Image (spheres, grey):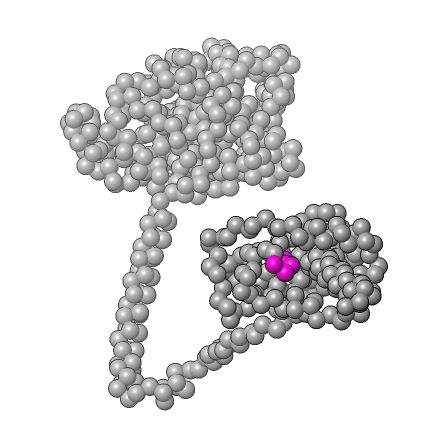
Amino acid sequence: MSQTSLKQKKKNETGSRNSKDSLDTEKRKDSEKSGVRLSTQGSQELSLPKTDSRGYVVRNQWSRTSRSPSTRAPSVEEPRSKNTSLKQLPSSSTTSRTSSTSPSQQESLKQLSEEPSPPTPPLPSTPPMPLDSHPPTPPEPFSSSRRSTKMHENPEAWAHGIVREIRDSRDAMPQRDYPRTPPTEWKAYTQRRSTYSSQLDQDCLSELPRQHHQREEEEDEDEAYWASVKTLYEKIPSCSRPRPPKPKNAITIAVSSRALFNMVDGRKIYEEEGLEKYMEYQLNNENVILTPGPAFRFVKALQHVNARLRELYPSEQDLFDIVLMTNNHAQVGVRLINSVNHYGLLIDRFCLTGGKSPIGYLKAYLTNLYLSADSEKVQEAIQEGIASATMFDGAKDMAYCDTQLRVAFDGDAVLFSDESEHIAKEHGLDKFFQHETLFENKPLAQGPLKGFLEDLGRLQKKFYAKDERLLCPIRTYLVTARSAASSGARVLKTLRRWGLEIDEALFLAGAPKGPILVKIRPHIFFDDHMFHIEGAQKFGTITAHVPYGINQKMNN
């Protein structure tokens, strides 16, 4: 063979070797871009990880359905589709690529290809794949990368797109239509009876009269029960009774049990049979209501004044306060309480002394007036400086006014002192008239009932302040045996000096008082002469004897 042919052959071998080297270099570059493992002829497989532009390793993302990791090295027996495709590239392309590389680069690439690659340790957990199996294909890039790119580029559009996708998915879900039962239309029994069976209809019809009869019996029982309850509550005094006034502000009227109620029968038993029989009689008759006594109508009139005052002055404390003051035993108090509640009397304070005189308690109760049927106790109270009077009932019934308290007073030894009485008894009527004319402008001294008249006048002014003068529930009277011409001026001037007003002044000049009192019809008339008391009793007037002055000494 000639030298020229040898050179040509050598040149061809060199070109083919260079072409192979350039082909290996291209394979290596492709493996670096795609991250797959490439192998050269006669050498072991070389694993080249995929890197990004900054040099960081990028891990492959495989399908989530594959259980075994997809990063294992492929076996030798696996078909290399990519290598074969690369080997089938046209020689023109390879030659063009090899021509572009320099000889020094080609030598370095050749050395790298000739160096043996380090052996890859086998993965024990990964079983070898069979020959006829194919490696799992990597999945398409995950959509989150595209979403994140869109989110960074245009966040508002990305958010609207997400909302739209959720809304579309919700609309795409099938909705269940629940059956709706129509409301039942009400029908009368006559319209529904056709749907019942005949036997059921007969049973219902037989039960109706029985149920109706039972319902009527129950309604009758209820009506009878509530009627009995109503009757019971009508007998019981109202629980909304007004509270009593404070004693320091009230006008306290102390009344004995014999003055408030008629206890003549019990008194007779006490005088004839003794205290034990009297108490036994009261205990056996404690549910028997006592009849009204001489002071009963007077107490009722006082309560009416309180009611009128509370209407005008709801928080008024200047009122009448009634106290039941008696020497009866405490066991008799049950009958007294029953009688007080029966008549609706507003008496909340009781004093039962059990045979002892109650006079010692009058000042403790701040008593302004004491009324009793026992003249001895009244005399004791007068001596203690407490206005007192002995009550006497009228001999016949009289109609009394229920809307106005009417109180009649005698003058001398009742409202005034008994100084003029002394002159009349000792020196006669002529000296009496001269004395009254001489001392006309000198006020008379006060008597035992002057304080009670002041209390009445104070309450009257409360009504006058409300323009209730003509409708005032209190009216006072002066009924005296004095003569107006000879001795009347001093009386009126004395009242004026005291600041007291009397509604009516009646000067009788010694005439009987009974007929005048019948016209007045007072709830109580105070006088110091017993013959005036007895004369008024005959006409039915309730009287109260005031044991004060010279007349009482002469009678004794």
**Of the pair 483 and 333, the residue shown nearer to us:** 333
Quarter occupied by the N terminus:
bottom right
Q: Residue at the location (42% across, 82% down)?
A: 188
Occupied quadrant, residue 168: bottom right
* Residue 396 colored in magenta in the image: no
Compared across the picture, whether 529 is left or right of 376 comes to right
Compared across the picture, whether 11 is left or right of 438 comes to right
Count numbered badges in the picture. 0
Q: Main secondary structure of the magenta part?
A: loop
Residue 500 seen anywhere in this rendered image of the structure:
yes
Q: Say if 26 sits above or below 252 in the image.
A: below
At which x and y percent is residue 526? Answer: 45, 26
At which x and y percent is residue 506? Answer: 55, 30
Compared across the picture, whether 405 is left or right of 324 comes to right
- Residues drawn in magenta: 37-42
At which x and y percent is residue 177? Answer: 53, 76
Q: Residue at the location (44% across, 19% down)?
A: 366
**Of the pair 404 and 117, the residue shown nearer to us:** 117
Residue 157 seen anywhere in this rendered image of the structure:
no
* Residue 38 colored in magenta in the image: yes
Q: Say if 52 sits above or below 309 in the image.
A: below
Q: Residue at the location (70% across, 50% down)?
A: 111
At which x and y percent is residue 419? Answer: 51, 12
